[in-house]
Amino acid sequence: MLYAIIGRDVENSLPARKAARPAHLERLKELQKLGRVVAAGPFPAVDAPDTSGGVTGSLLLLEFDSLEAAQAWADADPYVAAGVYAEVTVKPFLKVFPE
């Protein structure tokens, strides 16, 4: 099943985010090898094609066997450990489009 993991960043998260990013991406690459990543990326703080204006959070659409497994994975994210996220929400997600 797919799960949406939505992380809301603390204010001025960019320095901590940049420091934790390699470890965060490495975990996503491991899931990608297993075919479990639909999409993942940040919410830019401004309408721009990059994060130079800061970041307000992240959205990850990932496949797990259960809500508990998705929550455990989210809880162990390097962004959580680094204090990047003020809050993380994990919700089941049903992909309708594209078919």
Image (spheres, rainbow, N blue to C red):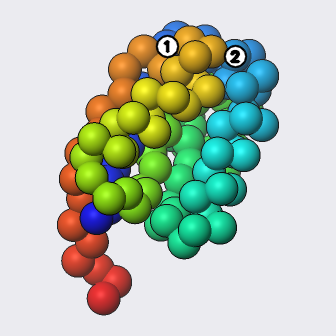
Q: Which badge, 2 or 1, comes first in the chain's sequence?
A: 1
Say which quadrant the C terminus sits in: bottom left
Mark 1 crowd level (few <14, some 14–19, many ≥20, 10 Å Cα): some
Q: Specify whether residue 56 is in view.
A: no
State the image coordinates of residue 64 (x, y, percent, origin top left): 37, 57
In this rendering, position of residue 99 left or right of residue 17? left
At x 65%, y 67%, the residue is 33
Quick check: marks 2 and 1 in contact, CB under 8 Å?
yes
Q: Specify whether residue 60 is in view.
A: yes
What's under tag 1, amino acid-wise? Val
- Residue 16 image label: 2
Say which quadrant the N terminus sits in: bottom left
Cα–Cα span, label 2 and label 1: 10 Å
- Residue 34 image label: none
In this rendering, position of residue 96 left or right of residue 22? left
State the image coordinates of residue 71 (x, y, percent, origin top left): 34, 37
Where 60 falls versus 45 (above or below)?
A: below
What's under tag 2, amino acid-wise? Ala
Secondary structure of residue under mark 1:
loop
Front residue of 18/77: it is 77
State the image coordinates of residue 26 (x, y, percent, origin top left): 72, 46
Where 99 falls versus 13 (above or below)?
A: below
At x 44%, y 45%, the residue is 59
At x 52%, y 21%, the residue is 80
The residue identified by callout 1 is: 10
At x 51%, y 29%, the residue is 76
Quadrant in the picture for residue 6: top left
Where 35 falls versus 63 (above or below)?
A: below
Mark 2 crowd level (few <14, some 14–19, many ≥20, 10 Å Cα): some
Front residue of 37/10: it is 37
